[in-house]
């Protein structure tokens, strides 16, 4: 249900965005699901919009729709194939219907930190992943960083046994489901926009996400506390439709690709800092953050890491080895 204020805000956003486009300009719609402040993706999308509208004025015009105001992640790729939206940046956990190559990013404790994720994505194997869905009409333009994930519930989570029997919202990914099952918990896939309400009403007991998402969606308000596990990764693929991309005038496409690359490099470099700010903002707002001792964290590693074995065929041992070499 949308409140009257939300409807007004949505109308205002749509009007502001529409007002920026002049007759004859190519309209580029970019739909995403997060907030815009203190969020790596939100900030990057806004910066991209700003630069396109300034530097490509008269040629192209970008309208960014944040906060799931246009599509949820389970709708946006279909809408893109229909030509209703040109850019999106779903997390790598949300491409299961198109490819399994991104499953490596959902394996628990696979990457030491976001720099390791960056190094893997920049490698030849990582770059090839951007083109893993072209046959299905989707082209990855760039990887965008969010950060590493933390876990929260309606009770303190210190040892992995504390998660046993609880229901956790997960993104729609087989690996993320298996991770929760390894903890003896019950995974509940659900759209991002529904998580706050589900936590509040007790439809689920807990969730896993980055500091910026926990802050942006205010999950900390409806959870006992957040445990700093750094167990997973939320990263994005800035994705477009191959049909649309190929239809662009080459000079226009080059200019757009260059702006996108510059925005990517600038904002990816800040993603860690943005998440740290969000973490501090959670604490400042009275949210509880629980740190683990190395021994306590190791117990989570021991409980979850066996999931790697279940997905080694999808992910490829050579990719796991490459990720581990980067960590070392
Ligand atoms: C989620 O669904 O939890 C995330 O993928 C949301 C996002 O875009 O960061």
Image (cartoon, rainbow, N blue to C red):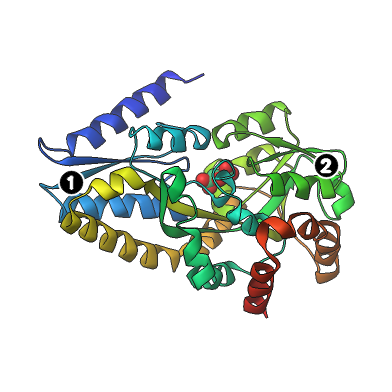
Q: Residue at x 80, y 64 (%)?
A: 297
Which SS class for mark 2? loop
Query: As drawn, is 289 to the left or to the right of 250?
Result: right
Q: Residue at x 83, y 66 (%)?
A: 298
**Up/down of 293 relative to 15, above or below:** below
Whole-percent x, y for residue 149 in the image:
64, 55
Residue closest to the eye, 221 or 111: 111
The answer to whether residue 88 is left or right of residue 275 is left
Q: 67 above or below 11?
A: below
Picture coordinates of residue 283, whole percent (x, y)? 62, 54
- Quadrant housing the C terminus: bottom right
Q: Residue at x 48, y 60 (%)?
A: 274
Residue 70 picture location, percent across and down:
40, 31
Query: What number is the disc on residue 185?
Result: 2
Q: Is residue 38 in view?
A: no
Q: Residue furthest bottom?
A: 328
Q: Residue at x 38, y 55 (%)?
A: 44
Q: Is residue 183 left or right of residue 169?
A: right
- Count neighbours of disc 2 (C-alpha within 10 A) and say few if under 14, some if 14 to 19, many if 20 or more: many
What residue is pinned by disc 1?
60
């Amino acid at each position: 249900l949308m409140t009257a204020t939300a409807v007004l805000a949505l109308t205002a956003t749509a009007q502001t965005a529409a007002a920026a486009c002049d007759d004859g300009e190519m309209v580029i719609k970019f739909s995403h699901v997060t907030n815009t402040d203190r969020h790596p993706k939100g900030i990057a999308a806004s910066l991209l919009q700003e630069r396109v509208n300034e530097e490509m004025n008269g040629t192209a015009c970008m309208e960014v729709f944040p906060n799931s105001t246009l599509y949820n992640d389970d709708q946006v790729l279909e809408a893109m194939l229909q030509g209703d939206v040109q850019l999106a940046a779903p997390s790598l956990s949300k491409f299961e219907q198109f490819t399994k190559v991104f499953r490596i990013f959902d394996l628990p404790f696979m990457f030491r930190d976001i720099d390791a994720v960056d190094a893997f994505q920049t490698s030849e194997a990582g770059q090839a992943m951007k083109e893993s869905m072209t046959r299905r009409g989707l082209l990855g333009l760039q990887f965008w960083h969010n950060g590493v994930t933390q876990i929260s519930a309606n009770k303190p989570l210190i040892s992995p046994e504390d998660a046993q029997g609880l229901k956790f919202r997960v993104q729609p990914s087989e690996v993320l489901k298996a991770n929760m099952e390894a903890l003896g918990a019950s995974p509940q896939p659900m759209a991002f926009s529904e998580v706050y309400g589900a936590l509040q009403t007790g439809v689920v007991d807990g969730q896993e996400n980055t500091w910026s998402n926990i802050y942006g969606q205010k999950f900390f308000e409806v959870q006992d506390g957040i445990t700093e596990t750094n167990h997973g990764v939320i990263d994005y693929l800035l994705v477009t439709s191959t049909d649309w991309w190929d239809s662009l005038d080459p000079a226009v496409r080059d200019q757009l690709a260059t702006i996108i690359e510059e925005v990517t490099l600038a904002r990816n470099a800040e993603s860690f800092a943005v998440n740290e700010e969000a973490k501090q903002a959670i604490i400042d707002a009275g949210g509880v953050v629980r740190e683990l001792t190395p021994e306590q964290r190791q117990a989570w590693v021991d409980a979850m890491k066996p999931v790697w074995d279940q997905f080694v065929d999808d992910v490829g041992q050579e990719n796991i080895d490459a990720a581990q070499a980067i960590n070392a």
